[in-house]
Image: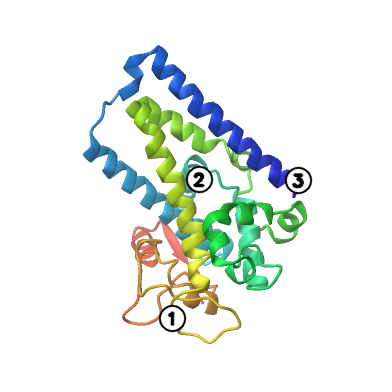
């Protein structure tokens, strides 16, 4: 728990240093205020939506369905891209995320569930969702529930050891491109990523919606169209059959993550596990 606290504090300190340095550089070098590419809000908006969507895709089809549940396996080159992009844009530790998710499935809606709105409250999941999840992670939990593939030198020495550094590299790249406007763009990206993961999926999907399956937890399908969170909205379906790479069940349900998986499979870049 202390290690989790120190990692969170380190991230906050790094944020203050990076943002403070950015403003200082912009004052000293006015040309940096608009970056190397200048300001074009149409292009910035397109990039913002694309990068956020790509992150959500990778989170669900790779980290969740691929790594946590082994429901699908990807081409090694695609896997390397997924790992790099996830490190760059989220700062997530793959081993800790997988361990947390395994614990969530094993102890859903009990005191041992690391992020249940039934235990912590939906309001707290909205305001403190990332802290609740972060502080639930212990070394013992990671040892007992961590099970990741490709736990190689790159994973251990960069993606895991420096898991919280990636988003700051991403910010620096955005700052070079669009100057000071990288501050609100980068901040909005992180806020929305956190909102979708910790409140929309972990919170609302255990509080609001409908069910197709009567199972011993509060998981719900938030909506029939899993687009915003790339299929994670169909949470009751997933809890009923966690080994399946497809989250949609009924004919009137749509799982965008499954759509992408099938496209990748048609290109021989993915292989879905036979149930």
Q: Earlier in the sequence, mark 2 or mark 1?
A: 2
Q: What residue is shown at x 63% (from left), y 73% (from top)? A: 109
Residue that numbered label 1 is attached to? 210
Binning the other alpha carbons within 10 Å of mark 2 as few (below 14), some (14 to 19) or many (20 upward) gives many
Q: What residue is shown at x 60% (from left), y 47% (from top)? A: 93
CB atoms of marks 2 and 1 within 8 Å: no
Direction front: furthest residue? 123
Element on which disc 2 rests: helix
Q: CA distance from mark 1 to mark 3?
A: 38 Å
- In this view of the protein, which residue sits in the foreground, 137 or 245? 137
Q: Position of residue 141 (x, y in %)?
A: 73, 58
Binning the other alpha carbons within 10 Å of mark 1 as few (below 14), some (14 to 19) or many (20 upward) gives some
Q: Is residue 94 visible?
A: yes
- In this view of the protein, which residue sits in the foreground, 128 or 145? 128
Residue that numbered label 2 is attached to? 90
Q: CA distance from mark 2 to mark 1?
A: 30 Å
Residue that numbered label 3 is attached to? 2
Q: Earlier in the sequence, mark 1 or mark 3?
A: 3
Binning the other alpha carbons within 10 Å of mark 3 as few (below 14), some (14 to 19) or many (20 upward) gives few
């Amino acid at each position: 728990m202390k290690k989790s606290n120190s990692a969170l504090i380190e991230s906050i300190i790094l944020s203050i240093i990076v943002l403070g340095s950015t403003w200082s550089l912009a004052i000293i070098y006015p040309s940096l205020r608009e970056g190397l590419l200048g300001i074009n809000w149409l292009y910035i908006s397109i990039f913002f939506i694309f990068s956020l969507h790509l992150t959500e895709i990778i989170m669900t089809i790779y980290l969740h369905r691929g790594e946590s549940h082994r429901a699908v396996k990807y081409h090694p080159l695609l896997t390397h891209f997924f790992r790099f992009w996830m490190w760059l844009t989220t700062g997530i530790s793959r081993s800790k995320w997988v361990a947390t998710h395994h614990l969530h499935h094993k102890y859903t809606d009990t005191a041992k569930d690391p992020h249940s709105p039934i235990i912590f409250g939906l309001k707290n999941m909205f305001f403190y969702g990332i802290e609740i999840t972060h502080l639930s992670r212990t070394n013992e939990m990671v040892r007992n529930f961590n099970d990741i593939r490709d736990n190689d030198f790159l994973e251990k020495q960069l993606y895991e050891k420096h898991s919280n550094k990636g988003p700051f590299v991403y910010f620096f790249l955005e700052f070079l491109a669009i100057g000071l406007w990288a501050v609100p763009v980068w901040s909005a990206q992180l806020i929305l990523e956190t909102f979708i993961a910790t409140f929309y999926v972990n919170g609302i999907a255990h509080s609001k919606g409908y069910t197709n399956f009567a199972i011993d937890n509060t998981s719900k399908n938030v909506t029939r169209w899993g687009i915003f969170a790339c299929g994670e909205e169909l949470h009751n379906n997933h809890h009923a059959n966690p080994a399946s790479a497809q989250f949609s069940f009924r004919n009137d349900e749509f799982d965008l993550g499954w759509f992408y998986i099938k496209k990748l499979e048609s290109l021989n870049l993915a292989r879905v596990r036979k149930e």
